[in-house]
Amino acid sequence: MSTAKDVKIYDLDVLVGGKKVIRLAGQDFDVSKIPLGLAFQLLELASALEKSKGDATSQLSTATSIIAEVLNTGTESTITDAWVKDNMSVEQVMAFVNILQELMDLGSDGSVDPTVAATNQKETSQSD
């Protein structure tokens, strides 16, 4: 029979880490926790941008909608695709994608660095 002291809780929230903010057009956006669905889209976008080096027009159009979704995550912001197009340069879009990859500890191949994940992992024991 197990007691409350035998219960182990693995706190996955610590993997999110501290607050991460991107400042854009004079506004601060919390990008600490990117939803998994957006992370997949971001990886696909980063891969497409890398492959298209010279002609990234269609990928940039996709990027603006993904960026708008990321900026709206966890906030009451109403950032739209049109806002992103009006307020970001090509260089900012590329930097945004690269920064988010770095913040998510994702390589360009979509792999998660296990040493980073292991370092961030925390085990908490629950007491009664």
Image: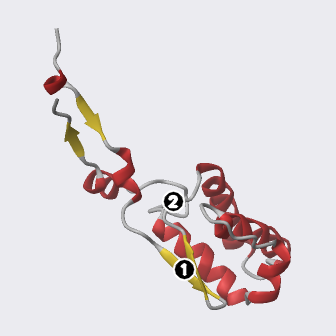
In the figure, residue 28 lies in which quadrant? Answer: bottom right
Residue at x-position 70% and y-position 72%: 49
Any part of residue 55 in sight: no
Q: Give the amino acid type for the residue marked by disc 1 in the picture.
A: Ile
**Residue at point 73%, 70% (across, down):** 68
Q: CA distance from mark 1 to mark 2?
A: 12 Å
Q: Residue 10, relative to residue 78: is it above or below?
A: above
Closest to the observer: 50 or 43? 43
User: x%, y% of residue 7?
Assistant: 21, 26
Picture mark count: 2
Task: Identify the residue under disc 1.
Answer: 22
Q: Position of residue 126 (x, y in %)?
A: 20, 34
Front residue of this view, candidates 27 and 24: 27
Residue 17 appears in the figure: yes
Question: Circle 2: is it few (<14), some (14-19), or many (20+) Cα within 10 Å?
Answer: some
State how the image is colored. secondary structure
Nearer to the camera, 68 or 116: 68
Q: Which mark is residue 33?
A: 2
Determine which of the numbered discs, if any, sits on residue 12 in the image. Answer: none
Taking the image as shown, residue 95 lies to the left or right of residue 123, namely right
Q: Amino acid at mark 2?
A: Lys
**Circle 2 SS class:** loop
Crowding at dot 1, Cα within 10 Å, few <14 / some 14-19 / many 20+, comes out as some
Task: Residue 65: give x, y in percent of width and height.
Answer: 78, 67
